[in-house]
Image: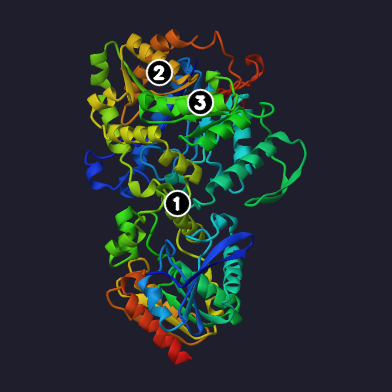
Amino acid sequence: MKFLWFHLMPYTELPDDFRERNPGVWVNIDSTLFDPRRAHVMYNDFMDELEYAGTCGFDAVCVNEHHANGYGLMPSPNLIASSLARSTSETMICVMGNSLALYNPPTRVAEEMAMIDCISGGRLIAGFPVGTPMDTCYAYGQNPSMLRDRYLEAHDLVKRAWTERRVFSFNGRYNQLRYVNIWPHTLQKPHPPIWIPGGGSVETWRWCAEMDYVYCYLSYFGYRIGLSTMRGFWNEMDRLGKDRNPYRAGFLQFVGVAETREEAIRLYREPAEYFYGRCLHLDPRFVQPPGYTTEATIRARVEGQVAAAARKATARARTATAMEDIVEQGYVIVGSPDEVAEQLRHAVTEMNVGHLMLLCQYGNMDRDLTAYNTRMFATRVMPQLADHFDDRWQNHWWPNPLPAAERAVPDAGLSGTLAAAE
Amino acid sequence: MSPEHETTVEVAGAPYRVWTAGTGAPLGVLAGFGGFLHWTPFLARLARHRTVVVPSLPGFPGGGGRAHVELDTQLDWLLRTQDLLAASGLSGADLAGVSLGAALAADVAAVWPDMVRRLVLVSPLGINDGDTVIADHWGATHSEQLALLSSCPGVLEQYRRMPPDADEIEWDVSQIRANEAAARLLWPNGETGLGGRIGRITCPTLVVWGAEDRMVPPGHRRLYRDGPGGPVSETVIEGAGHQADFDRPDDVAAALVAFLETEA
């Protein structure tokens, strides 16, 4: 198993009546609620937490991209990742990821990720989401009818920029560049591992299989609901003749660990209810722009009775905003270390997922509780699952960093040395 | 209620539906959001006076399947529309458009002045007034969308309801596809650059507005009234919303007929 510590960077001070007084947390969230002085503290807490997770033994730390979003304060995950490339040394850095169609030209992504890969000594995982409708079509004004084609073309350009060792011209439908010649290049060859976060789109599954990328189902609604999607993924892999290597897949899960289940429910109630009550207060107006979902996926959803039933169950389940329901539905796995380990073992086995992305901070969880949850997970849950799958499968989709002896060591003492010299 | 003739013309390798009804000089009509799903009272009323010719626009019902995905730029849309009008026998004919159909009709008249004899723009889109933009038809719930488009949303909803003999899946797909085609043309602000070309319109032009249009801010009206280089008249239809042809078919059709007859 690989354990990745994921931060969404939620704004932690949305008011108690946020749900009642605001249409949504995304796109049209009330701008006056944002206090930069408080965000100064939040950002620094969040980065402390990511750095702490890196020292606790998590295999990777994860950041992602959102725009105009009250639960995701990272319009540029690359900014955070570049800081982590300096402040961490062993953990991998998973940028999950850059919404390729939003960058003009997309070689900007190739350049920035190559910088992070070089600075970190080859510890980068490159995530390429299409991006949510809210981020891409509404906050960034991308045409939903062109988004996927732009994304696919941008992907081709980035990958060529990473792999070709000559100056080349790119004459695409949406991007025309006379000279493509990025400096720097990625340290990992031929390029960092590419992971694709997605929903339940059959086309995305097929594309991941074709390109040999990791498919990550980033659901906020836990493994019980995620199971049907992951079964669909593996059925499609079977159909395509791909093996069932669990490292082809990633899954996101909220966790809350304490000495006992009762204690865990007491500790994590407020942040969980904050997240599901306020952070996931989505305005339905921005969920389904025309053309975002392909006709093949629409047909698959309409035609599949099982899928339709699952969707209805999902819709019912997603109304849960009270801790008892949140736990009952499996959105957040809580309990003692043994209880959490047992539930996760069941979840990853059933879903056949080798990359487990964990949200140990969510909602308005403060730094101390985040650190406690992170530490409890790292020291008492992770060891129980660390070898899971490894007796049968190799992870071909993990970064290949420089050996420690060859890596530069950030030298915080240099400024002092220079001052002394002067 | 149905058109007298339904034919298919091939444009750029895709089949496009063309409805025809009535007698007299031809009048082309380009639909607004959603396209024409059935023959409408507005078209029937026009057909009493003119030969009404209704080609389907790319991606809209009858409009070449997913032909819209080939169209990336406004020039692509205009060339396809001009080809479609020519294939439908509408070169040099009178041309009316509703909403996004009016945006294309106006641009065709601007770019190819000989293509359009007289022009009718019902609730036109394509130009914004600085940062004051049209309402967000897509960032809206289903009921809000209907209310933005029509002063009689129940009538519009009824019009869009699936016929009993239709395939449910394909009906839904065709509706979503039409919405996507509109988005491909107008996302995100409904701006097509027409403002830079509207001065090239030299033919007589009638602009029709619904008094209860919630899509287009009233301040936009002057842009279409003052923009064209030729003579412009303007009519506001009481009780009508953005899709004025649905809301007040008789009144809008009467305004068109009066304009076309006067100008003839």
Tell me residue A4's x, y (percent). 47, 22
Amino acid type indicated by mark 1: Pro
Disc 2 from disc 1: Cα separation: 34 Å
| Placement of the C terminus of chain A among the 4 image quadrants | top right
Q: Residues within 10 Å of mark 2 (few under 14, many from 20)?
A: many
- Discs 2 and 1 share one subunit: yes
- Discs 3 and 2 share one subunit: yes
Instruction: First in sequence, mark 3 or 2: give its number.
Output: 3
Disc 3 from disc 2: Cα separation: 17 Å
In front: mark 1 or mark 3? 3
Tell me residue A77's x, y (percent). 50, 36
Chain containing mark 1: A
Which residue in the protein does label 3 denote?
A235
In front: mark 3 or mark 2? 3
Write down the quadrant of residue A39 in the picture. Answer: top left
Write down the quadrant of residue A264 in the picture. Answer: top left
Question: Mark 3 and mark 1 in contact (Cβ < 8 Å)?
Answer: no
Q: Residues within 10 Å of mark 1 (few under 14, many from 20)?
A: many
- What element does badge 3 sit on? helix
Question: Mark 2 and mark 3 in contact (Cβ < 8 Å)?
Answer: no
Q: In this view, does A199 lie above or below A1?
A: below
- Discs 1 and 3 share one subunit: yes
Write down the quadrant of residue B2 in the picture. Answer: bottom left
Residue displayed at 34% across by 46% down:
A284
Residue displayed at 62% across by 24% down:
A121
Q: Residue A347 carries which label?
A: 2
Which residue in the protein does label 1 denote?
A290
